[in-house]
Image (cartoon, rainbow, N blue to C red):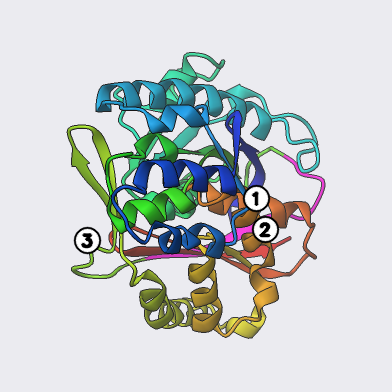
Amino acid sequence: MPKILSVSTILPPYEVKQQEAVELTRSLFSEKYKDIERLLKVFQNGDIEKRDVCMPLEWYGKEHDFEERNELYIQNAVRLGVDAVQSCLTESSLLETAVDYEQIDAIVFVSSTGISTPSIEARIMNKLPFRDDVKRIPLWGLGCAGGAAGVSRAYEYCLAFPKENVLVLSIELCSLTFQKDDYSKSNLVGVSLFSDGAACALVSGDQSEIAVNVPVPSIIGTTSKLMPDSEDVMGWDVKNSGLYVVFSKSIPAIITDWLGPFVHEFLSSYGLSNDDISHFVAHPGGKKVLTAYEKALGFESSMTDISRDVLRNHGNMSSPTVLYVLKRFMESKPQSGDYGIMAALGPGFCGELLLLKWD
């Protein structure tokens, strides 16, 4: 089976403490909400202490049109992407030797927070010495589900081409979408939660020549699921000044009712149950989302400790976040034979699951 050999994570340059985000939001929203102090409790209740963004904090309190936002998206995505790729190919704690750019056969690029044609991975290929026949597979619009979906698509590619190696590059700059004049509660929740980040994973077929020095997760199988007529659960409204967040308060309830049967059916197709899963690589969409995961799957809270820690220190970066969680699991060196589930949910409303086994 294809394996995940290496994962890198890269943070943008500006760290924002949660209290700093509260103060900015209070200054922008207080005139529109008489009960602003009550609403600002969403920042404290989210279990996030700090996040990282690509622009200085004062930038977010000013007017910006879609053109400016998108140009900043391209500039920052290319810079972060170059760093993420370089780090992924030289991950000394996992890889026996650094991977040469010539060994990469395809790049899956995942993002939903900006627009670029040519897409970001093409721009990165012009800055790093990749072969000119690398397959490019850009994925857009999967939101928080994108990191897991990108790894799933790389798995399928490596099943078809077992000698080849695929990079999954996920970059989101959620902060650039912040609309200071959007006084909806969706925007208030979004600004309390979302952040920026980049991650890159190396997925290789089982006949690849790249070697590792510790057990790494093989991908046993994947599955996707779409909830019909659920477009209004999460996503973007595209307007003249940019992307406006759509974020339904019903998401935790949806997860509780919908995720359990989805996961149980997936595991049973491999003759497994929740009791066989040692590692839950869950995208931390938010504190309530993680609680809903536990309730839906009957997991102890310890199963989401790593996801909660990533959320606490980085917020929700959308698609790269689950790869941050995966990196932490890989660094913890699970035992050979351990099973894991990688899970992420996103707009559609949709879910992506991967069954992992360390060996």
| Quarter in which the C terminus is drawn | bottom right
- Which residue does the image show at 23% across and 67% down from the upper left? 230
Disc 1 designates what residue?
313
| 46 is higher (above) or lower (below) than 77 | below
Amino acid carrying label 2: it is: Asp
Question: Mark 3, residues whose alpha carbon is within 10 Å: few (<14), some, or many (≥20)?
Answer: some
Disc 2 designates what residue?
309
Q: Is 41 on the left-hand or right-hand side of 178?
A: right
Residue 117, given in percent of the width and then of the height, sits at: 29, 24
Q: Which quadrant of the structure image shows residue 178?
A: top left
Residue 242, given in percent of the width and then of the height, sits at: 25, 35
Amino acid carrying label 3: it is: Glu
- Which residue does the image show at 33% across and 72% down from the upper left? 250
Q: Is 38 on the left-hand or right-hand side of 218?
A: left
First in sequence: mark 2 or mark 3? Answer: 3
Q: Which residues are magenta?
A: 211-224
> Closer to the camera: disc 2 or disc 3?
2
- The span from disc 1 to disc 3 (Cα, nearest Å) is 30 Å
Asked whether 193 or 335 is in front, the reply is 193
Question: Mark 2, residues whose alpha carbon is within 10 Å: few (<14), some, or many (≥20)?
Answer: some
